[in-house]
Image (tube, rainbow, N blue to C red):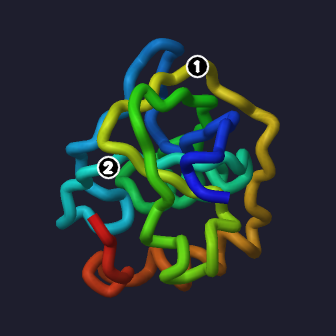
Amino acid sequence: MNAAQEAGPFFHGTAADLRPGELLSPGFRSNYRPDVVMNHIYFTALRDGAGLAAELAAELLPGDLVPRVYLVEPTGPFEDDPNVTDKKFPGNPTRSYRSTAPLRVLEEVSDWTRLTPEALQLWRDRLVARAPEERGEIIN
């Protein structure tokens, strides 16, 4: 399925504490590569995919942060996320997208699957423990 056919619902995972109506916009540093200012805002149609992003954001950013998943609404056109589509996975099985337009927060959702301690440790070992420049390229 390509972005033109996707109707949602859509989710965004983050460590930010947001309220309904707030906008998530591009132009901030990547959680994965803080040396990169992002030209897009990323989201997915998979609640648990957003949960993984939230868990990683809480791990990668300084402080004792809480992973959060939000139901969001794109305010403009969007496309398949080239960082995972075709480059890493044929098609778009992760149903991951990006936009240069903001996402509107509709509500926080809590019924997403948290990573087990073992899975979180695996991600720490694979990603968090690596220096940002070793975390892979971001197609921006």
Q: Quadrant of residue 119?
A: bottom right
Residue sitting at the far front: 4
Disc 2 marks a residue whose amino acid type is His
Q: How many marks?
A: 2
Between discs 2 and 1, the one toward the N terminus: 2
Q: Is there CB contact under 8 Å for labels 2 and 1?
A: no
Identify which residue is drawn at 61% across, 39% down.
Answer: 11
What crowding class fits label 2: few (fewer than 14 Cα within 10 Å), some (14-19), or many (20 or more)?
A: some
For the N terminus, the image quarter is: bottom right
Tell me the CA gap for discs 2 and 1: 19 Å
Vertical relation: 44 (above or below) 77? below
Q: Quadrant of residue 95?
A: bottom right
For label 1, the residue is 106
For the C terminus, the image quarter is: bottom left
Q: Nearer the viewer, residue 14 or 49?
A: 49
Identify which residue is drawn at 62% across, 20% down.
Answer: 107
Which one is closest to the eye, mark 2 or mark 1? 2
Residue 35 place in picture, x, y as percent: 18, 66
Identify which residue is drawn at 39% across, 83% down.
Answer: 130
Identify which residue is drawn at 38% across, 44% down.
Answer: 99
Vertical relation: 100 (above or below) 35? above
Residue 118 place in picture, x, y as percent: 75, 74
Q: Report the side of 12 relative to 41 (left or right).
A: right
Q: Report the side of 139 relative to 80 (left or right).
A: left
For label 2, the residue is 40
Q: Nearer the viewer, residue 100 or 112?
A: 100
Q: Nearer the viewer, residue 118 or 71?
A: 71
Q: Quadrant of residue 34?
A: bottom left
